[in-house]
Amino acid sequence: MIRAAVLALAATAVLAGPALAAPDKNPAAAPSGDYKLDSRHAALIARVGHMGGVSKSVFRFNTLSGTLKWNAQDPTKSSLSVAIDPKSITTNVAGFAEELSGEKFMKTAQFPQITFVSKSITMDDADEGKVTGDLTFMGVTKPVTLDVDFNGSVQSRGAAKLGFEAEATIKRSEFGLTAAPSAIGEDIEIQIDIEFDQIKPAA
């Protein structure tokens, strides 16, 4: 019986394969160059107060695209551009995503894209910093600062993959999103999880 258990554990280990190496948190270890956002591993979560703050309503934007120019020696010289499809919003309330995309709220037919373009980067620590850039939402462009954590880099199929987490808070009325002020809070908390894949030069 013991022998059978040992064999079962061994088979499980073989099927699982070798353990993945932990990401390298040293920014200098991630190759400099151009990266493309991996849309399969990216999401933007928005949280906003409901009914005066009795709870938070949570929304997710699933469709993101973008590019990163990474400077490993000096990350403050990196640059970032991201686009979000507002129609990709999802909620756990039936029919509410369609309402949010419509004329009452985000007016996505008129404003089909949300963009963020970095203007400056500062480092608070080796793997933490702030990215300030222009956020364009519903036709209004305003500066927004993201608090960013560098999750590290790994090698995958001969190319580097970089991961980041970021958060910020914006005031929705500043971008013209003013509907339902008695039910929906003013502050929108933004949480971003994102990966970028290295673009290898053509052979």
Image (cartoon, rainbow, N blue to C red):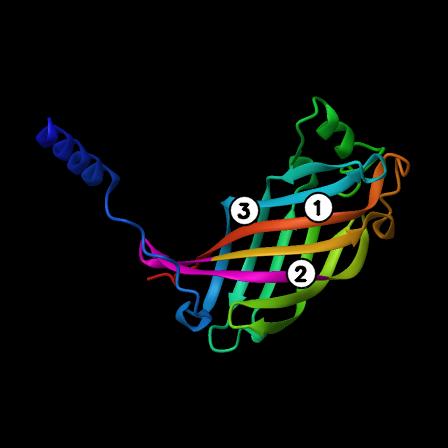
Residue situated furthest left in the rendering: 3
Give me the residue at 70% from left, 64% from top.
133
Q: Is residue 48 visible?
A: yes
Which label was assigned to residue 103? none
Name the quadrant of the C terminus. Answer: bottom left
Distance from disc 1 to disc 3, alpha carbons, whole Å, reads: 16 Å
Instruction: Identify the secondary structure beneath mark 2.
Output: strand
Residue matched to label 2: 146
Quadrant housing residue 155 = bottom left
Please state the horizontal and vertical placement of residue 166, each as a whole percent of the image.
61, 56
Q: Which residues are magenta?
A: 145-162
Membership of 153 in magenta stretch: yes
Secondary structure predominantly adopted by residues drawn in magenta: strand
Separation (CA) of disc 2 from disc 3:
16 Å
**Which of the image's four quarters has the N terminus?**
top left
Write down the residue under mark 3: 42
Give the residue pinned by disc 1: 113
Can you give x and y, in whole percent of width and height, for residue 105 in the image?
82, 36
